[in-house]
Image (spheres, helix red, strand yellow):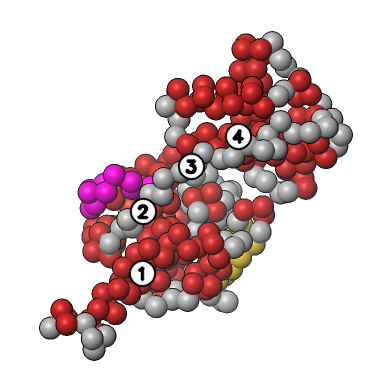
Amino acid sequence: MSKKAFLDYLELERNYSAHTVLAYSSDIDEFFQFTAVQYGVKEAVDVVYPFVRAYVVNLSEKSLTHRSINRKIASLKAYFKFLQKIGDVEISPLAKHKSLRIKKEIQIPFSQSEVNSVIQDLSEEKDFKSIRDFTIITLFYATGMRRSELINLKISDIDFATGTIKVLGKRNKERFIPLIDWLRDVLKKYLNIRSVCWHSVDLPFLLLTDKGDKLYETFVYRIINRYFSKASQKTKTSPHMLRHTFATHLLNNGADLNAVKELLGHSSLAATQVYTHSSISELGKVYKNAHPRNYKKQ
């Protein structure tokens, strides 16, 4: 019962998405399956910190990354904190747990030439699939939205009159992203062919699969990976890399960090600062070329 109450709390009070709530549920179940087998413990009140430590070791032996382990333990931390709040446990067994260190990986975004290569290959196509794929890529690169946000976009979210797209972000937080002229043209072209191919389909969602259904995560991933794996040698060619590229290219061209934060839908500036490493590199080039005391600029 306490687990259901916790999941209801996440969904109804914290406004977490169904996908996130399911991940929390899975993490909790996995932990208690481990304690049941290893210690015969199935109730939260009987859990002690050595069980958690053994669980972390077990996950590590399964070759999970520190990031994945930390995410699972964060779910448990939230769960036991909730149980403590409602009085089911007196002290959380994870109260003093410290997250595993994560080696910071610098993600190199797609270059402008790589993005342009994909855009050029698709821009002249005239069939529904190609125009739909081009629209997906354009939306990611022109707005920086998340994959889940793109999947849930509705036709009614596009307002050509005001020149904005309404995006429903994490925890159902709305934000409005300006429609640049390039994106406006691409969307109009897509909507025209969508109405021709799927006029009989009564779906509110903007982007559709080849069968006229709502998009899903792996479908979107395959599209981005298909085109960018040809144009780029990078190992990561995911939708998130286009979001990363959007932010980095804006910062490289002088965009204000706070403005980029708002466009991305980040709740704090710290989350946006992860994208600044490439712009700092660009800034360094400008600095070295412009400073009068830099002897090597000659």
Q: Residue visible at 58% across and 48% down?
A: 202
Q: Earlier in the sequence, mark 4 or mark 2?
A: 4
Residue nearer the viewer, 138 or 77: 77
Residue indicated by mark 4: 73
Number of marks in the image? 4
Say which amino acid is labelled 3: Arg
Q: What residue appears at the point 71 percent right and 15 percent down from the top-left corner? A: 41
Lower position in the chain sequence, tag 3 or tag 2: 3
Is 77 situated left or right of 143 in this image?
A: right
Q: Is residue 10 above or below residue 231?
A: above
Q: Is residue 48 above or below residue 12?
A: above
Q: Secondary structure at mark 4?
A: helix
On the image, which quarter does residue 29 sit in?
top right
**C-alpha gap between disc 4 and disc 2:** 24 Å
Residue 250 sits above or below residue 37 on the image:
below
Q: Which residue is under mark 3?
A: 101
Q: Which residue is mark 1?
A: 280
Q: Which residues are magenta?
A: 229-239
Mark 1 burial class by Cα count in 10 Å: few <14, some 14-19, many 20+:
some
Q: Is residue 123 inside the magenta stretch?
A: no
Residue 182 place in picture, x, y as percent: 39, 71
Crowding near the residue tagged with mark 3, few <14, some 14–19, many ≥20 C-alpha atoms within 10 Å: few
Q: Which residue is rendered at x = 62% and y = 26% of the image?
A: 52
Element type at mark 3: loop
Q: CA distance from mark 3 to mark 4?
A: 13 Å
